[in-house]
Amino acid sequence: MGIKANYSVSQEFCTHSLCSIQPPTHINQCSPETVPRRDCSRSTPGGSCSTPGQQLPSSLPQPQTRLCYDLMATAGKVIRCRAAVAWAPGKLSVEEVEVAPPKAGEVRIKLVATGICRTDDHLLQGCFPNAEFPVIPGHEGAGIVESVGEGVTSVKPGDKVIPLCHPQCGKCSFCRNPESNYCQKSHFSEPQNLLLDKTSRFSCKGKQIHHFLWVSTFAEYTVVPEYTVAKIDAAAPLDKVCLFGCGFSTGYGAAINTAKVKPGSTCAVFGLGGIGLSIVMGCKAAGASRIIAVDINKDKFAKAKELGATDCINPRDFQKPIQEVLTEMTGQGVDYSFEAIGHKDTMIAALASCNMSTGVCVMVGEVDSGSEISIDPTLLLTGRIWKGTLVGGWKTRECIPKLVSGYLEKKFNLDLLITHTLPFAKVNEGFELLRAGKSIRTVLLF
């Protein structure tokens, strides 16, 4: 039958540190003094939760001890919980799913928060390569380890973690290369619709549900391979640092690692979504003297300037191609250009807008599956460099925890990227905001 997760709707919160209605900024450190108490169907007279049919011993008074007790209660058992299932391309349906225990080398995570990324929308449109339906999308989450399978040593129950949409196995030739952040386990090399034994840990209404990029963060619980998990600082607020799972890391790293933006340089950023604005932040941190933000949605210009853009332009305001506009604005074209949209036309425009001899163009946006681009080879013959980036060039398991620490040290403020916070049940509303251009990042809370 499985253990059913509780999802009550009261405005207050339970004191239990793993309850599905626990406020994310207090996860793993709750107490009656720091978190408002509320009663739920799992509460004991003392206000703490226990697994249905069990009483929490009075000899376990500390929050961390209560946490461990709860983990012991669910470890090795099937958990029934909510998840957003795409039965076919189109709209998501919030369903009750069953999540099997982790097998050897796997980790089961209780998600606390997840961001909505444009890549998830590509999946729902049927444009993501090699995806299979029905599927649980989501790849930008943060949570707590609930249990681990045999042989897992890098994380333990109770650890705060970020599941990684790009793995780091540490063993393949790419992982061993200090100049590469690619991994042979990436979805570009092998499908990630099922786990390593070619089975799924998700089921719903008697049917197998596929994983997405192995992580499937649109579920209260998920099971992933160990090498797709990054342990992070216990002080990290999970409703904020979930963006390190994709958006912020990809954009910021595209400027810092892939392009290696130099102080005093000029940059152009095409697309001002969560990744594009993170690129702006990276260019500013690298010391760029001029950062030109390009988007057809003028409502995003104020946020771009707040994060470091010096100029904001709308291609629709000009009668000539935007690459010509940028070349005229800068004299010889920008030193670095970034395409964070995923359109063929803007990719060519971004390449043509950078300096014809020394310019560097970084492709960050992901085009639809099966797309091909035709270019004039003279754009590259004169010396331009055209590069791509995956998760900003970071070796994920090594670097994501360091980025989280940098956030806690206030080296950058990714909170500014979060424009909407919604309960998980409103996941489809979050996608509507994304498609209407009204949000930068929407974070869903479980």
Image (spheres, grey):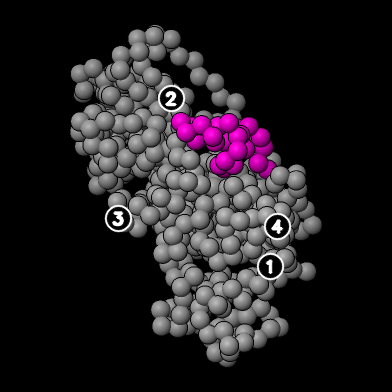
Helix, strand or loop for disc 3: loop
User: Real-space Cα distance between discs 4 and 2?
Assistant: 40 Å
Query: Which span is picked out in magenta?
Result: 167-194
Q: Dot 4 corresponds to which residue? A: 150
Q: Nearer the viewer, mark 3 or mark 2?
A: 3
* Quadrant of the image occupied by residue 364: top left
Helix, strand or loop for disc 1: loop
Our reading of the magenta stretch's main secondary structure is loop
Name the residue type under label 4: Glu
Against 347, residue 425 (above or below) is below
Q: Earlier in the sequence, mark 2 or mark 1?
A: 1
Q: Nearer the viewer, mark 4 or mark 3?
A: 4
Q: Earlier in the sequence, mark 4 or mark 3?
A: 4
Is there any visible trace of residue 301 in the rendered image?
A: no
Q: Nearer the viewer, residue 116 or 76?
A: 76
The quarter of the rendered structure image containing the N terminus is: bottom right
User: Real-space Cα distance between discs 1 and 3?
Assistant: 36 Å
Q: Which mark is residue 410?
A: 3
Q: Nearer the viewer, residue 141 or 132?
A: 141
User: Real-space Cα distance between discs 2 and 1?
Assistant: 44 Å
Q: Nearer the viewer, mark 4 or mark 2?
A: 4
Is there any visible trace of residue 179 in the rendered image?
A: yes
Q: Earlier in the sequence, mark 1 or mark 3?
A: 1
Name the residue type under label 1: Ala
Callout 2 environment at 10 Å: few (<14), some (14 to 19), or many (20+)? some
Callout 3 environment at 10 Å: few (<14), some (14 to 19), or many (20+)? few
Q: Earlier in the sequence, mark 4 or mark 2?
A: 4
For the point 53% across and 63% down, the residue is 159
Q: Dot 1 corresponds to which residue? A: 75
